[in-house]
Amino acid sequence: MPKEPNASAQLPSSGTIQTDPLTETSQKWFEYPVRAQPHHTDYAGVVWHGTYIAWMEEARVEYLRSIGINYANLVALGFDLPVVELSLRYHTPLRMGEAAIVKTRTNNMQGVRINWDYQIQSLDGQQLYISGRVTLVAIDREKGKVMRQLPPALKDIFV
């Protein structure tokens, strides 16, 4: 597995992706390997921006599965976790044929909001392609409204 980069190696952003060291989680990153296939790229062989978002979602769903939360079961229980905020920083392009690691972790839950941090980097951890944050909220599927609090079973798993 690639060595985890020093957090200070990330370029500072305009403020939307920066984390507060007082609330940042100490949890280890979940790693999800990907390879840039031809259908992931634009005409120049560079990974298309939407591909990064799809990989981030795949990593998030696989992370949940790895800790015992099957996303289909969440839906069956009557709630969903849609994205309500997304922020990305493109550092270096990833090109067709290259492999990478999508790293994700939860960070700083606030009520029904669950923040996820992301880094997409080279296998050796030397090149950072993307950094970002996604915020999800718990929605009651039947009512179509934001829940007042996370369901206890889900909150216990994240805490």
Image (tube, rainbow, N blue to C red):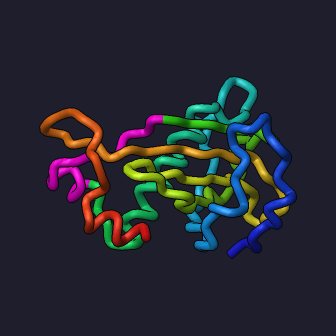
In the image, is 101 to the left or to the right of 14?
A: left
- Give x and y (percent) for residue 73: 21, 59
Q: Nearer the viewer, residue 52 or 35?
A: 52
Q: From this view, report whether residue 13 is shown above or below residue 99.
A: above
Q: Residue furthest top?
A: 43
In the image, is 131 to the left or to the right of 125?
A: left
- Give x and y (percent) for residue 131: 70, 47
In the rendered image, residue 79 lying in the magenta stretch gets the answer yes
Q: Nearer the viewer, residue 41 or 21?
A: 21
Determine the residue positioned at 34% across, 71% down: 156
- Give x and y (percent) for residue 127: 82, 55
Q: Quadrant of the N terminus?
A: bottom right
In the rendered image, residue 37 lying in the magenta stretch gets the answer no
Determine the residue positioned at 79% across, 66% down: 5
In the image, is 67 to the left or to the right of 98?
A: left
Q: How many marks?
A: 0
Determine the residue positioned at 65% across, 45% down: 132
Determine the residue positioned at 32% across, 72% down: 68
- Give x and y (percent) for residue 100: 68, 56
Q: Quadrant of residue 158?
A: bottom left
Question: What range is drawn magenta here?
Answer: 72-84
Q: From this view, report whether residue 142 is shown above or below residue 101.
A: above
Q: From this view, report whether residue 51 is shown above or below residue 121.
A: above
Q: Quadrant of the C terminus?
A: bottom left
